[in-house]
């Protein structure tokens, strides 16, 4: 009986050994799968690092390109400033030449068109206003319909609505400062955009074309 029990116990141990070996084999397979997964993760990490490096290089190139564009923008702005100065210089030269013609010829044109007599000369004047000086191109005392009035005007190459509004503000300031109840406002320009021409009419400003003055 003891022998039988011993053999049965040995058989159970043999079965347990088989199960143990099978478990070890399964653990070995799981270990292989773990190592393979770790290797795959390591490869993925390498690819990630490589991609990050490529992005870093691309960022450097982008920053360099932005810097180049910023430098190009500076050069463009500098060039625009130079061209603007040249255009302004040409415009000013033309404007001064037109002003000189206006000073000589406008009195006769005013007399012929509006029966206005200019008292003395038409001159330029500066007025200090809020800490800065504003120039009026045309300033003169006139007689219109038997009334003495103050004439204020501008000579422009091609006036804009903004310039007209600015002129009206200055004219209102001068009117109050001079104590003149009535003013005669006038513009002389080389060219008027149709909208500007209508705007002058709306504001009650007399205007002449440069050829009107030059033909006097």
Image: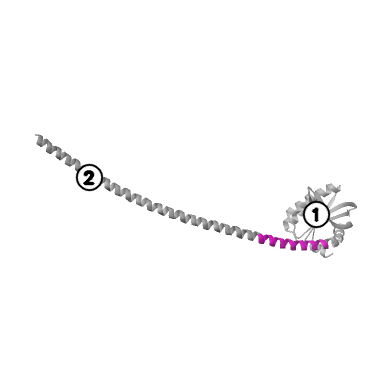
Q: Position of residue 12 (x, y in %)?
A: 16, 39
Q: Quarter of the image for the N terminus: give it.
A: top left
Q: Position of residue 96 (x, y in %)?
A: 79, 61
Identify the secondary structure beneath mark 1. Answer: strand
Please tell me which residue lies in front, 197 or 10.
Answer: 10
Mark before the other along the chain sequence, 1 or 2: 2
Q: Left or right of 158: which side holds 100?
A: right
User: Badge 2: how crowded within 10 Å, few (<14), some, or many (20+)?
Assistant: few
Q: Which range of residues does the magenta coloring cover?
A: 78-100
Residue 204, relative to residue 215: is it above or below? Answer: above
Please tell me which residue lies in front, 81 or 164.
Answer: 81
Query: Mark 2 and mark 1 in contact (Cβ < 8 Å)?
Result: no
Q: Position of residue 176 (x, y in %)?
A: 83, 47
Please tell me which residue lies in front, 98 or 32.
Answer: 32
Q: Main secondary structure of the magenta part?
A: helix
The residue located at (63%, 61%) in the rendering is 75
Residue 88: within the magenta? yes
* Residue occupying the far top of the picture: 1
Q: Position of residue 85 (x, y in %)?
A: 71, 61
* Residue occupying the far left of the picture: 1
The mark found on residue 22 in the picture is 2
> Label 1, on which residue?
135
């Amino acid at each position: 009986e003891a022998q039988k029990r011993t053999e049965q116990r040995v058989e159970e141990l043999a079965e347990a050994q088989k199960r143990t070996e099978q478990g070890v084999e399964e653990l070995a397979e799981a270990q292989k799968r773990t190592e393979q997964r770790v290797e795959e993760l390591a490869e993925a990490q390498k690819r990630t690092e490589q991609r990050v490096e490529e992005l870093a290089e691309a960022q450097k190139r982008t920053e360099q390109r932005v810097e180049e564009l910023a430098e190009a923008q500076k050069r463009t702005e500098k060039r625009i400033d130079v061209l603007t100065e040249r255009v302004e210089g040409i415009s000013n030269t033309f404007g001064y030449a037109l002003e000189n013609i206006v000073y000589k010829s406008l009195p006769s044109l005013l007399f012929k068109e509006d029966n206005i007599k200019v008292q003395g000369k038409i001159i330029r004047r500066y007025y200090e206003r809020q800490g800065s000086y504003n120039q009026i191109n045309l300033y003169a005392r006139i007689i219109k319909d038997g009334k003495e009035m103050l004439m204020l005007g501008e000579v422009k190459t091609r006036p804009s609505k903004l310039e007209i509004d600015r002129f009206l503000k200055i004219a209102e300031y001068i009117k109050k400062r001079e104590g003149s109840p009535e003013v005669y406002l006038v513009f002389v320009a080389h060219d008027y955009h149709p909208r500007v021409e209508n705007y002058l009419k709306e504001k009650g400003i007399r205007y002449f074309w440069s050829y009107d003055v030059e033909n006097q």
